[in-house]
C-alpha cells in the first residue's frame, strides 16, 4: 500500500528504528527491530530480520541450539488489523543522513562514489529488498579514486549508519551488513551485481566477502522487512541511512592470524554478527592508511519475510592451528 512520507530527525518511539537487516546474538528488545542468525555449520542458521517497520518487534526464530534469536516481542498492532489508516502508512526518518558523523580517518583526495545514486540519495530498489523477498537485492556499482600512497589492498564495509549513530551498544551489532576485503590495489571499483561465495573474483584478483546473515553474499538494505499482513508489521515504515566505508590498507592480504574469531556458544555455533567483528577490526587496524565513504538512504519494504539460512564462518588462525578447517571456509 501507499506510504505517507514524514521526516523526523530522531524518531523516539522507534528505538533503533527498524532497519536491522542482520544480527546473530541475543534477542533484541522490542523496538530495535531485527532478529538474529546463527553462523556456525550449515543447518544452524536462525532467521534474521531486517528490522521492525516502526519499532515493533522483529521476528526471526532459530533452530534449537543455533544461537539465533526468537521473536523480539509482540507486534504493536497484530499485523495491519487495527491500523486505521486505510492502507496508508507513515514513513519516518531514523537519523538524518547528512547529520551523521563521518567515518574517521578520511584522507584528502581519497573518495568513493556510485553512479546508481547521489550522496545521501535514495538507493535504487534493485539494490535493496524493496518489493521482493527479504534478503534479496543486488549490489550497486562503486568506484573510487585517490588512494593513499602505499595502498596494497582495499576493504569495504556496508553499514546501517542510522543505527550506529544511536550509539547504543545493545543494538550496534545490527548496523553491519556486509564486508569485502583483500580487494586488489589495482582495482578502482566494483561492478554491480557481485556474485556469491567467500572467495570472489574481482578484476585482476580475488577478494573475500561475508554478509550480515552469516552468508557469503551481499546483504542489502531492508529497513522494513515485514510485509503488510505479517504478524509483526506495525503499521508504519522507516527510512535508514547507509554507508559504504572504504579502507585503504598497507597489506595485500589481511593476515589470517588477525582475522577476528567468531563468538561461539557451548555447541560451537556462531552467535554474533561476524561482519560487526570484522568492521571493528578495520576501524581500529594499524594497516589502514585512510578511509572514504559514500552514503545513501532506503525505505525498502520487503514483500515476503523468508530469511536465508546461515552458513559457515570464515576460517581463523585458531581454526588452522587446531586442524578444524572442515568447520569453516576460506582456509589458506
Image: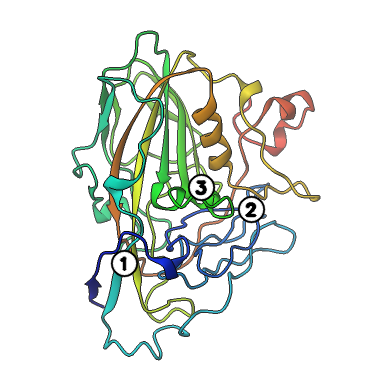
> From the viewer's perspective, is 197 left or right of 141?
right
State how far apart marks 1 and 3 are (Cα).
24 Å
Marks 3 and 2, the one that precedes in the sequence: 2
Q: Residues within 10 Å of mark 1 (few under 14, many from 20)?
A: many
Q: Secondary structure at mark 2?
A: loop
Q: Nearer the viewer, mark 2 or mark 1?
A: 1
Reading the image, the residue beneath label 3 is: 212
Marks 1 and 3, the one that precedes in the sequence: 1
Question: Which residue is at a point 54% across and 35% down the rendered structure image?
Answer: 280
Query: Between 237 and 221, which is closer to the camera in this rendering?
Result: 237
Residue 332 in view (yes/no)? no
> Which part of the image, by quadrant, shows the N terminus?
bottom left
> Which part of the image, by quadrant, shows the C terminus?
top right
As drawn, 276 above or below 105: below
> From the viewer's perspective, is 260 left or right of 285?
right
Percent x, y of residue 144: 27, 26
Reading the image, the residue beneath label 1 is: 92
Q: Residues within 10 Å of mark 3 (few under 14, many from 20)?
A: many
Percent x, y of residue 185: 37, 16
Percent x, y of residue 60: 56, 66
Marks 2 and 1, the one that precedes in the sequence: 2
Q: Secondary structure at mark 1?
A: strand
State how far apart marks 3 and 2 are (Cα).
10 Å
Q: Nearer the viewer, mark 1 or mark 3?
A: 1
Label count reads 3
State how far apart marks 2 and 1 are (Cα).
30 Å
Reading the image, the residue beneath label 2 is: 38
Residue 182 in view (yes/no)? yes
Question: Which residue is at a point 18% across and 43% down the rendered structure image?
Answer: 118
Amino acid at each position: 500500500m501507499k506510504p505517507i512520507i514524514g521526516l523526523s530527525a530522531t524518531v523516539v518511539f522507534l528505538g533503533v528504528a527498524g532497519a536491522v537487516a542482520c544480527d546473530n546474538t541475543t534477542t533484541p528488545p522490542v523496538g530495535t527491530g531485527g532478529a538474529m542468525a546463527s553462523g556456525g555449520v550449515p543447518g544452524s542458521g536462525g532467521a534474521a530480520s531486517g528490522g521492525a517497520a516502526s519499532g515493533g518487534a522483529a521476528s526471526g526464530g532459530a533452530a534449537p541450539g543455533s544461537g539465533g534469536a526468537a521473536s523480539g516481542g509482540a507486534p504493536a498492532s497484530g499485523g495491519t488489523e487495527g491500523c486505521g489508516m486505510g492502507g496508508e502508512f507513515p514513513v519516518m526518518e531514523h537519523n538524518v543522513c547528512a547529520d551523521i558523523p563521518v567515518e574517521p580517518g578520511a584522507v584528502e583526495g581519497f573518495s568513493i562514489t556510485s553512479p546508481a545514486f547521489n550522496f545521501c540519495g535514495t538507493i535504487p530498489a534493485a539494490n535493496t529488498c524493496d518489493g521482493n523477498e527479504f534478503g534479496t537485492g543486488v549490489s550497486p556499482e562503486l568506484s573510487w579514486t585517490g588512494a593513499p600512497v602505499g595502498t596494497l589492498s582495499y576493504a569495504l564495509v556496508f553499514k546501517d549508519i542510522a543505527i550506529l549513530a544511536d550509539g547504543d551498544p545493545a543494538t550496534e551489532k545490527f548496523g553491519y551488513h556486509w564486508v569485502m576485503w583483500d580487494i586488489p590495489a589495482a582495482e578502482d571499483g566494483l561492478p554491480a551485481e557481485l556474485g556469491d561465495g567467500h572467495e570472489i573474483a574481482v578484476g585482476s584478483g580475488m577478494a573475500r566477502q561475508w554478509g550480515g546473515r552469516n552468508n557469503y553474499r551481499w546483504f542489502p538494505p531492508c529497513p522494513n522487512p515485514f510485509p503488510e499482513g505479517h504478524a509483526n508489521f506495525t503499521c508504519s515504515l522507516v527510512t535508514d541511512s547507509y554507508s559504504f566505508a572504504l579502507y585503504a590498507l598497507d597489506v595485500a592480504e589481511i593476515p589470517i592470524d588477525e582475522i577476528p574469531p567468531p563468538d561461539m556458544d557451548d555447541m560451537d555455533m556462531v552467535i554474533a554478527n561476524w561482519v560487526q567483528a570484522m568492521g571493528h577490526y578495520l576501524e581500529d587496524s594499524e594497516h589502514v592508511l585512510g578511509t572514504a565513504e559514500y552514503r545513501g538512504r532506503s525505505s525498502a519494504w520487503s514483500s515476503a519475510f523468508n530469511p536465508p539460512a546461515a552458513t559457515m564462518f570464515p576460517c581463523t588462525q585458531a581454526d588452522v592451528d587446531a586442524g578444524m578447517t572442515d568447520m569453516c571456509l576460506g582456509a589458506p
